[in-house]
Amino acid sequence: MDGITTIGDMTLFTWRMLTWLFTRPPCRGTVLINFYQVGALSLPVVALTGTFIGMVLAVQSYSQFHAIGLDSRLGAVINSTLVKELGPVLAATMLAGRVGGSMAAVLGTMRVTEQIDALTAMGADPIHYLVVPRFLACILLIPSLTIMADFMGIVGGYFYSVIILGIDHAAYLNHSRDGVTGFDLFSGIFKSIFFGSTIAIVSCYRGFNCEAGAEGVGKAATTAFVYSFVLILAVDLFLTIVMNSIYYTIYPNGTSFL
């Protein structure tokens, strides 16, 4: 019963947020501050994570491809996996950990110290002032973070495959180009928008409904990340099924990496 109540409460929370978003967008200054915190400050960790994931994929895949004499095809698998799945999911995971937890902690602290109640008393809607800018920052900047994760993962995979493993440079790039389509890139970026909205809604909701005390703030930050991560994976599964159905409708023969 508590789960159903939470889902209903979160739905109403989302509806109020969307109503403010489309009827009276937030002021430019508030949005830019959140853009900086969500986007610029997340770039280093997203870039570093993407680089190492690309290298790990090269390490894990090389032995299997080398055993069947398809070393040069490694780039197609690495880059396709990054662009379609790992890039968007990893960028969203980093955003949920670094930004989502912070959002829940900040809003939770404001709830505990009655700052949110003070905003209401002054005639300002706290959802319009606090939630809408954070929601906009997440959905507008996570595509850029996803592209950064994709790019750095491709660079990391290329570096380990070509420089360290000695795979032929031209063959690696040619197969990488043939193995990744524009639809793959679009699919990953499209999914990232839903991931960003999930992170913003869950994190802000947990912050607004924070329990009293320092323990409540910590619990809100933790649950915001855990719920966001689980929902990211669930949304990813659903969207992957939908995007694959669309892809095979447009391209009935599909493509082959090998």
Image (cartoon, grey):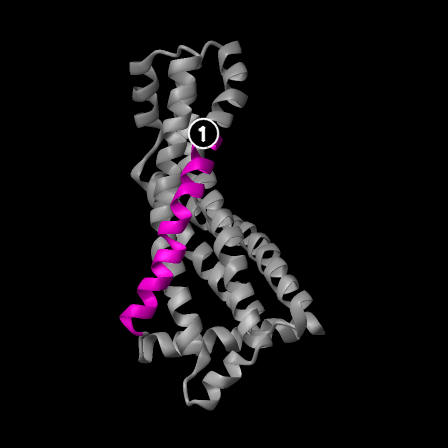
Closer to us: 141 or 177: 141
> Could you say which quadrant of the image residue 78 lies in?
top left
Q: Amino acid at mark 1?
A: Gly
Which secondary structure, mark 1?
A: helix
The picture places residue 23, in percent across and down from the top left corner, at 32, 80
What residue sits 27% from the left and 70% below the top?
28
From the top left corner, tell me how far across and down residue 129 is, in percent.
Answer: 40, 76
Q: Number of marks in the image?
A: 1
- Against 254, residue 116 (above or below) is below
**Horizontal side of residue 57 vs 36, given as left or right:** right
In the rendering, at what x and y percent does residue 237 appear? 53, 48
Which quadrant of the structure image shows residue 22? Answer: bottom left
Counting from the top left corner in percent of width and height, residue 251 is at 34, 39
Q: Residue at x 42, y 90 (%)?
A: 123
In the rendered image, residue 90 lying in the magenta stretch gets the answer no
Q: In the rendered image, which quarter contains the C terminus?
A: top left
Does the magenta portion include 46? yes
Q: Nearer the viewer, residue 179 or 40?
A: 40
* Residue 241 visible in the shown view: no
User: Circle 1 sits on which residue?
Assistant: 54
Q: What residue is rendered at 45% in x and 50% in y?
A: 242
Image: magenta residue range: 27-54
Q: Quadrant of the N terminus?
A: bottom right
Judging depth in this view, the residue of 130 and 187 nearest the camera is: 130
Dominant SS type (magenta): helix
User: Is 242 drawn above or below residue 202 in the view shown?
Assistant: above
